[in-house]
Amino acid sequence: MSVLRGLLFDNLGLKLAALLLAVLVYLNVYLDRPASMIVSFPLELHDLADSLSLSGPVPAAVQAELRGTGKQLLRLRVTEPPLKLSLAGVGAGRFERAMTSEDLPLSASDLLQADRLVGPRTIELQIERKMRREVPVALRVEGLPGSGAALSGPATAEPGSVVITGPAPVVAKLDSVVLLPARIGGRRDSVRVQVAAEALPDWCVMEPPLVKVTVPLKRLAP
């Protein structure tokens, strides 16, 4: 028994180092073998005119099946280089662009071959004129004052309206911007918080991004 224990635990550090080295050598050899893998390239859109705005869904990435060594493919999958698509000179309306393997952000030094595009094979975008419009905010209060306190007046928002910028057909339909709730649960003194919009339509931004909401509370006489 002592002999077996000695074989297992004598020079344990040296044995673990040898095992780790063997695993690294095996992985290095294994990853140098030819392989294929589906890799995602995040889609980045550039050069859209300031007077225009995207509208509706946009593909998050373009996927392609690539062939190379396991090491090369693993490195590419970890780094995920973006696929940059220029929208310079594009006007309002429907935009379509067929994608090919030449659009993939691969360099000659990568030594990778694109076997096929998985998708999307065509980038379809809706582009609209950009609109700026002032819209009132709709504030909300959640919770009840703490024991011995009560509301002393209506809640107020500062500013009472915000400027929304985004695709014209969407911005034109907005009648208000709903804010995240100001929570007063258990509070006994007036609450002053800065809150953002609960949700904005896609491709819309709000100025200012935060609105100051005041909920006046007063302590009741004992």
Image (cartoon, rainbow, N blue to C red):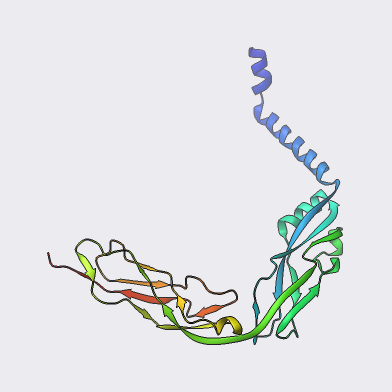
Residue 167 falls in image quadrant: bottom right
Residue at image position (64%, 17%) is: 5
Looking at the rendered structure, the number of numbered marks drawn on it comes to 0
Quadrant of the snapshot with the N terminus: top right
Residue at image position (80%, 52%) is: 37
Report x, y in % for residue 67. Answer: 85, 54
Visible residue check, residue 167: no
Give the camera-side residue of 131 and 87.
131
Left or right of 178? Residue 22 is right
Quadrant of the snapshot with the C terminus: bottom left
Residue at image position (72%, 86%) is: 91
Visible residue check, residue 161: yes
Left or right of 197? Residue 126 is right
Give the camera-side residue of 178 and 6.
178
Report x, y in % for residue 212. Answer: 38, 76
Report x, y in % for residue 3. Answer: 67, 13
Residue at image position (74%, 84%) is: 90
Q: Is residue 16 above or below residue 134?
A: above
Give the camera-side residue of 62 and 151.
151
Report x, y in % for residue 64. Answer: 80, 60
Q: Is residue 81 above or below residue 68?
A: below
Left or right of 173? Residue 211 is left
* Outermost residue to the left: 222
Residue 63 falls in image quadrant: bottom right
